[in-house]
Amino acid sequence: MHSALVPLVDRRAPADADQWDALWEALAGGALERADALALLASLTAALPDGPSLLALLDALDRRRPARPSAPWPGTVNVVGTGGGPPTVNLSTASALLAAATGVHVVKSGSRAHTSRTGSVDLLDRLGVPLTSSLDHTGDQLAAHGIAFTGPFVYPVQLTRLALLAVPTPMRVFGRFLNTLGPFLAAVPVAAQVTGVSAPEPPPTIRALAARPGAPVTWLTTNPAGADELLSVTDNTVHLPDGGTQALPAGALVPADGTLVDLAPVAAEEAAEHFRAVLTGRAGAPLRATLQLNAAALAVASGHRDDWGAAVAEAGDALDDGAALGLLERLTTAHARGGSRAG
């Protein structure tokens, strides 16, 4: 094992930024072997590092990123969950489109499936929706459509290098670590972020990542079902950056009829067609209510609306009048016509 890995895997004390720096320097210099990459990824997946170690990891990665805008895009919200929990349709992707159809500026970061049946990027591929290739390209998409789905450029190249070094072992083997850390790795200059956590309460490590200096104003959402999005069929809690919480009792904002079965995903080959039906609001009352609830969260978190009831109603209108589905069709049409340029 390379000496740079020893303190990171041994964990007798929190790893500091210098130790993470030594790892990334060894990786960049070609000094790590495949066995080193597998040992590190296996250690991170078996048990997440403590909060200080994870913060030091993000600091070390941030110092290696290209320069970012000095100020966030005002009124823009990113929606991304930790994965895990009961399987559902791609609610965060659908709610991003629905919120954007009501006028919210939304960035949707995400990845291919690590633990779910179809990740957001897998679904977007099937739908023919383009990913952005740079921050400039992302800004152009926001200006043109009010929504942008970011490509892999927002994630640290060091993790890509680790993945390549680990080949042929697929990264989905290490999905637990990647899902947990992923929402806090995307370098997008948003003002707010809504992150569903697949646990009844956010673990201390996730709270620390959400509250780290320089992070957007981040809402963490939880529910007793352990889903990483708000659900209409159960109580939900929004954990606010100041340590407070906002309770969203089942039935208070949207009907609470139905069960998790009504929100379950379909087979991958049917996902795109089913997703279009979801955006019409006619794929079942529980799905419609859940979409409205999640879109409303984006509207309120971004500052687009300050009243949950009004935001829920506006999302319902965007389902009924075809605005949400129409936005999806405009994105796919622009892509087909070559309207998605490389940034």
Image: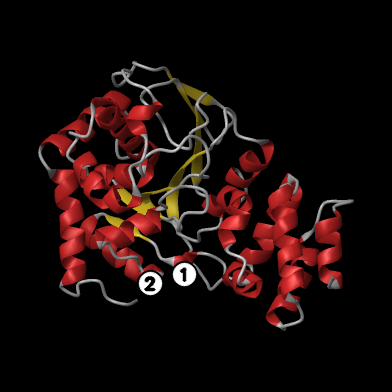
Q: Is residue 203 above or below residue 327?
A: above
Residue 19 in picture, x, y percent from top left? 80, 65
Disc 1 element:
helix
Circle 2 Cα neighbour tier, 10 Å, few/some/many (<14 / 14–19 / ≥20): some
Residue 194: give its label.
none
Left or right, 212 with reference to 19: left
Frontmost residue, 311 versus 44:
44
The answer to which of 38 and 68 lies nearer the viewer is: 38
Amino acid bearing label 2: Ser
Q: Is residue 239 left or right of residue 276?
A: right
Question: For mark 2, what is the residue?
Answer: 133
Residue 185, horizontal then vertical, whole percent: 55, 57
Residue at which label 1 appears: 153
Residue 319's spot in the image, x, y percent? 17, 37
Percent x, y of residue 309: 28, 24
Q: Quadrant of the C terminus?
A: bottom left
Residue 208 in the figure: left or right of residue 191: right
Q: Residues within 10 Å of mark 1 (few under 14, many from 20)?
A: some
Residue under the image location 24 percent in, 26 percent down: 285
Mark 1 to mark 2 CA distance (whole Å): 6 Å
Quadrant where the image shows the N terminus: bottom right
Q: What's under tag 1, amino acid-wise?
A: Phe
Quarter assignment of residue 205: top right
